[in-house]
Image: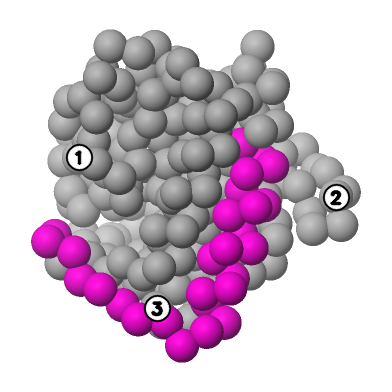
Amino acid sequence: MFRNELLEMIKVSKMAREEILKVYHSDFAVEIKSDDSPVTQADKNSDKLIREYLHEKFPSYAFLTEESNDDVKRLTNDLVFIVDPLDGTADFCAKNDEFTINIALSYQHQIVAAVIMIPVSGDIYYAEKGFGAYHLYPDNSLKRIHVDNKDDDLVMYTSRFHPSEQEKLLPLLDKRIKTVEKRGSSLKGCFIAEGKGEVHYRLNEGTKEWDIAPMDLLVKEAGGVFIKPDLTSYQYNKVDVYNHNGYIIANKMSNIYPAYLKK
């Protein structure tokens, strides 16, 4: 149903990749925004390119992006592109290669198409609602991906720059977790969707809709779990774009530590 939009989202992610890498391989400046988060010319260039390209292709659709002023007219539009033109700017500034481009399409508050591009490698993860999740490799080979079925010896991904105190304590509390790996940006969701790891907890309010929208659909279409700690699913294109209570990603519900679920 949204295949054409998905194909254009993939295409523009490749174009934005080139803009981002030009800055990444240069001596770039870093600005600090009013919320104390960093922003670079790569964020701005990617945002402009994605918005202009998708607006030309789909002029009636609205936008919610990290680097643009929020036009509240989006709230009356069923179709909204939700974009983080450079997810993981701290990783970008640290030059650890672990940043992504996040592009999602929301239809009536649900994510129906999702693209996550990893600029340094050129790998793309994408999903369309009801049609599964996929890994598109730089050589254009394609693999359908699925979460694994592990119940023990779990790999837990944590945020490299924004770990909560609960995250730090969890490996001591949940003996099923055997390995803890730091990963930047949306890579955590991509890797769980692909079966490389099993759980990730973000239990504070530092993220917004554009940080999670494509991961949400990717993980679910790969057979996994993406929920709020109160067990509900996220709605998108809201007035308040903050994810106040964080989120939890897992390969299966039974692997979520019960004490972190608010019933």
Taking the image as drawn, is residue 149 in sight? no
Q: Assign the C terminus to one quadrant of the image.
A: top left
Outermost residue, bottom side: 27
Taking the image as drawn, is residue 138 in sight? yes
Residue 24 painted magenta: yes
Which residue is labeled 1 in the image?
242
Which residue is labeled 3 in the image?
93
Pick the front one: 203 or 257: 203
Secondary structure type for disc 1: loop
Q: Are marks 1 and 2 in contact (CB under 8 Å)?
A: no
Secondary structure type for disc 3: helix
Label 3 crowding class (10 Å Cα cut-off): few <14, some 14-19, many 20+? some
Q: Position of residue 3 (x, y in %)?
A: 69, 21
Mark 2 belongs to which amino acid?
Asn
Looking at the rendering, the stretch of residues picked out in magenta corresponds to: 9-35
Pick the front one: 144 or 173: 144
Residue 140: numbered disc:
2
Is 261 rendered above or below residue 92?
above
Q: Determine whether, in the image, residue 196 is placed left or right of residue 233.
A: right
The image quadrant of residue 58 is top right
